[in-house]
Each structure stands twice: as structure tokens, then as C-alpha cells.
Image (spheres, grey):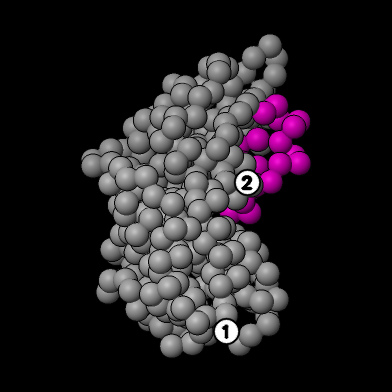
Amino acid sequence: MSHRHLSRSVVLQTLFEWDFDISNGKSVDAYEVFGRQVEEFAPESKDRPFMNNLLKNVVDKKNDLDNIIVKAAPDWPIEKISIVDRNILRMGLAELLFADRGEVPPKVAINEAIELAKSYGGETSGRFVNGVLGAVYREMGEPGKDDQPKPKKKYGNVPDSELPLEKLAGAVVYAKENGETYLALVHDIFGHWTLTKGKLEGEETEEAALVREAEEELGVPIVVKEKLGENSYTTFHPEKGKIKKQVTYFLAEAPYQELTLEKKEEKGGLDDVRWFRLADILGLNFYDDILPIVTKALQILAQTG
């Protein structure tokens, strides 16, 4: 076992015990646990500064890291992820986001987390960790992607047409007030303003799912007006593996009233919701794939006055 893999293993064992005790209502000092783990498994290690820094980043930034995990794996609540997998993800994200990239390049952080998952997790842990950290890495703009040869794919290359399909509904929600038109946008923890959306439940129609999601995510009732278009993308599910999500977007009207973001939505990777005047949205940070949807909505609103 390499010294750095051993170091990460000690930190993982520390976090496992710390997280387990906290989940069972016990008060525990992570650094006290860490001291015991080092003495037992790495008493002669000279890598303690690295281990200390990694542990500190995870413990101090746990809530932020968990929010990112939920955003990258929205169908898997943090408490439902196994205690091993969620702490490997926390460690991988801490290295990916906060480590010195000269010491730990992003791809090394991801690969090391995958190796931990293979060593300590379940049968699908490696794939799950790879999917979540890969999604965050892409959101970061793939720093350092040209520094090393692309790794070979380990889990096959399933055509999109054969992937499990999950359907969602989303909307450009607008309101009119005193001669002004406003759009309701939600903000995610990656720094983007985006559109309200959610998956269909049971036998729901797209319109019914959208009305429910808008009430939950924005806190306002909406009236669906017309279809704007569709977007598709792939993501990873911890049980199903790679899946395809298809979002059908609509134009919808709401009353101009206070927007409220439910606590459960905050846990799902959203941290703000606001009304914006049309003139104020031009400088906002949108995802590229929703820009055509927003543009089409603005064209329709301009034509209808």
C-alpha cells in the first residue's frame, strides 16, 4: 500500500467512526479519533500534515460538501448513501476543491477516491464515486484535463438510447406587475441561476408534476401556458448506474408574490430563489443548455406584451 493511500485510508477510518457516532447521537471529537487511528495504523507515518489537512477540510466544510454531493446525485439523499461512500465522497470533494493542485491534481483526487471505494465500499461504490466526482469535475470546467492522457473507461460505453430514462418537467416561470415582467429563478450551489424543475412521480403528467414542483421549490402556484422544448443529459444513479434524464420545459405564469425556498430544496443543492426583471437577467450565470429555453420564453413574452 502506498504511503498516500495509507494516509487516505486512516482519514477514511477516522471519518467512518466519527460519522457513525454522530449518526447515533454521540458527541465525539474527530481529532481524538484521528489520533487513535494514526497510532494504530500509521504510527511511523511522516504524512501526518497531509492527513490533518484533509481531515480538517472535511470536518470544517462538511455541510458544504454534503450540499454538493446532493446536487451531483439529486436522487440519493445524503443519509441514504452508505457511511463509507459518503465519507469517500467528502474526502474526494475536499481534495478536488480545496487541495493544492500541484500536490494533488484533480484527476488524482478522483482516482484515489475511486480506489478507496473499491477497497472499502460495496460492489457499485467505485462507479458511484466516479459518477459523482466526475459530475463536479465537469462543473468546475475540468481543470487539468489536458495534463494527463485520458483514462480508459472502466464501466462500458452504453448507448444513450439503451439507458434507463427518467422524465422531468421544468418551467420558465414569469409574473407581471405594474407593467414589468419578472422571471422566477433558483440558484444552485455551483453558482448558476437556473429553472425550477423536478421528476414526474407515479402517473403524473408533465404539467401536474410541474405545478407540484413549483409550489415546493418556489412557493407559488403556477398556470402552465405552453411547451418550450426539451433537454436531455446523462447522470449517475448509485443503484442504476448511468441513466438518462429528459426534461420537458414549459412557459408558466405565477402571481408576483414572495418566493420561498423550502428547506428540503436547500438540501437538494439550491440555496436561493428570486424574481428578476427581464432587463436584469442578461448578466446572470446560466447553464448553456437552458439558454435556448430561456431565450424562446423571452421571445414569446415579448410578442405577447
Q: Which residues are magenta?
A: 276-298
Measuring from the top left, give residue 86's x and y in whole percent.
39, 59
Query: Farthest residue in the left direction?
Result: 203
**Which numbered disc, 1 or 2, marks the residue that appears first in the sequence?**
1
Measuring from the top left, give residue 142's x and y in whole percent.
63, 69
Q: Nearer the viewer, residue 3 or 29?
A: 29
Residue 293 shows in this picture: no
Measuring from the top left, give residue 261's x and y in whole percent.
49, 29
Q: Are circles 1 and 2 on residues that touch, CB within 8 Å? A: no
Q: Is residue 159 above or below residue 261?
A: below
Name the amino acid type tagged 2: His
* Residue in view at x 45 percent, y 64 percent: 34
**Separation (CA) of disc 1 from disc 2:** 28 Å
Name the amino acid type tagged 1: Lys
User: Which quadrant would the N terminus be assigned to in this image?
Assistant: bottom left
SS at mark 1?
loop
The residue carrying mark 1 is 150
